[in-house]
Amino acid sequence: MTIQEIQNEIIEEFSMFEDWEERYQYMIDLGKSLPLIQEQYKTEDNIIKGCQSKVWVHAEMQDDKVVFTADSDAIITKGIIAILIRVFSKQHPKDIIEADTDFIDEIGLKEHLSPTRANGLVSMIKQLKMYAIAYQTQLS
């Protein structure tokens, strides 16, 4: 699936819920299905700066695609990074770099997060794209 197709799927899933309580619960459930980072990668270098909670992200290339794993010490944050990884993992670096993240506004996520969590969300996106840029440079 393309990044856009995955984003559309997420928008559709979130539209099924009546209120934000249900959406938060869904995000928590998504966090439970997150491809977890191996303990050896839970290092200071892999922590996303700008997040109120601890969020570790590891990226590696497999068959010219970036594969992300992550973890967080907070359940909502774990759900947020799970959504982002679902969108960006197993995609070509160039597609990650060029992808917009309008789906976040469409599902209403940013407006329902505290300012510090919203900043963390932006930091997570930035970090995933930085990994993609690094891998794209290696491919070029």
Image: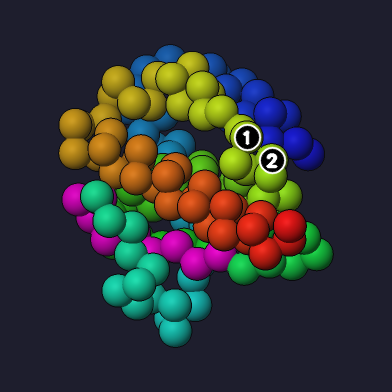
Q: Is residue 73 magenta?
A: no
Please report the residue visible at 75 percent of the width from the left and 36 percent of the height from the top: 2
> Which quarter of the rendered picture does the N terminus lie within?
top right
Q: Residues within 10 Å of mark 1 (few under 14, many from 20)?
A: few
Q: Residue 73 at what x, y percent from top left?
A: 29, 61
Q: Which residue is mark 2?
A: 95
Q: In the image, what residue occupies the spot 62% across and 35% down?
A: 98
Residue that numbered label 1 is attached to: 98
Give yes or no for residue 57 being in the magenta stretch: yes
* Residue at x-position 39% and y-position 68%: 46
Image spot of residue 4 (x, y percent): 68, 29
Disc 1 to disc 2, C-alpha distance: 5 Å
**Taking the image as drawn, is residue 68 in sight?**
no
Asked if the residues shown at circle 1 and circle 2 are in contact, with their CB atoms under 8 angstroms apart, the answer is yes
**Magenta segment boundaries in residue numbering:** 51-59
Q: Position of residue 48 (x, y in %)?
A: 33, 58
Residue ID at (34%, 77%): 43
Q: Nearer the viewer, residue 91 or 79?
A: 91
Q: Position of residue 47 (x, y in %)?
A: 33, 64
